[in-house]
């Protein structure tokens, strides 16, 4: 049994929603749904993966953990 919290991520462009544990990044949550968000460095440096979220504003999807319910414009 997992001791991690789980949160919902809604990807508005595709209309898909997934519930993932808090150690998932937004990018990993997207991949699990088959959504291919643009990425390059995957280390939070280049900014290629920036997405707008309702809750946290503009974030880097490759580094941002799903630590609350999120609505993503991606
Ligand atoms: S892919 Fe480069 S900052 Fe996320």
Image (cartoon, rainbow, N blue to C red):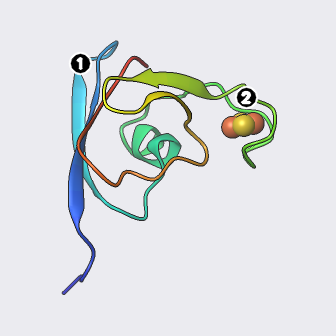
Q: Residue furthest top?
A: 13
- Is 66 left, or right, of 42 in this rendering? left
Q: Residue furthest bottom?
A: 1
Residue 46 vertical position relative to residue 26 in the rendered view, above or below: above
User: Which quarter of the figure is the C terminus placed in?
Assistant: top left
Distance between the alpha carbons at the discs numbered 2 and 1: 24 Å
Q: Nearer the viewer, mark 2 or mark 1?
A: 2
- Is 44 left, or right, of 20 in this rendering? right
Q: Which mark is residue 1?
A: none
Label 2 packing within 10 angstroms: few (<14), some (14-19), many (20+): some
Residue 51 picture location, percent across and down = 52, 23
Residue 36 vertical position relative to residue 63 in the rendered view, above or below: above
Q: Secondary structure at mark 2?
A: loop
Q: Compare residues 16 and 8 and report the one nearer the observer.
A: 8
Q: In which quadrant of this rendering is ligand 1 seen?
A: top right
Q: Quadrant of residue 35?
A: top left
Residue at horizontal 22 percent and vertical 52 percent from the top = 7
Q: Secondary structure at mark 1?
A: loop
User: Which quarter of the figure is the N terminus placed in?
Assistant: bottom left
Q: Which residue is mark 1?
A: 15
Residue 26 picture location, percent across and down = 45, 42
Q: Which mark is residue 47?
A: 2
Q: Compare residues 68 and 39 and report the one nearer the observer.
A: 68
Residue 15 picture location, percent across and down = 23, 18
- Is 72 left, or right, of 19 in this rendering? right
Residue at horizontal 46 percent and vertical 53 percent from the top = 65
Residue 23 picture location, percent across and down = 42, 65
Residue at horizontal 23 percent and vertical 68 percent from the top = 5
Q: Is mark 2 within 8 Å of ligand 1?
A: yes
Residue at horizontal 39 percent and vertical 17 percent from the top = 73
């Amino acid at each position: 049994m997992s001791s991690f919290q789980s949160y919902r991520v809604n990807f508005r462009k595709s209309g898909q929603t997934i519930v993932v544990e808090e150690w998932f990044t937004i990018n990993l949550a997207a991949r699990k749904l088959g959504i291919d968000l643009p990425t390059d460095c995957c280390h939070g440096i280049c900014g290629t993966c920036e997405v707008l979220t309702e809750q946290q504003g503009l974030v880097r999807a490759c580094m941002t953990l799903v630590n609350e319910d999120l609505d993503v414009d991606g």
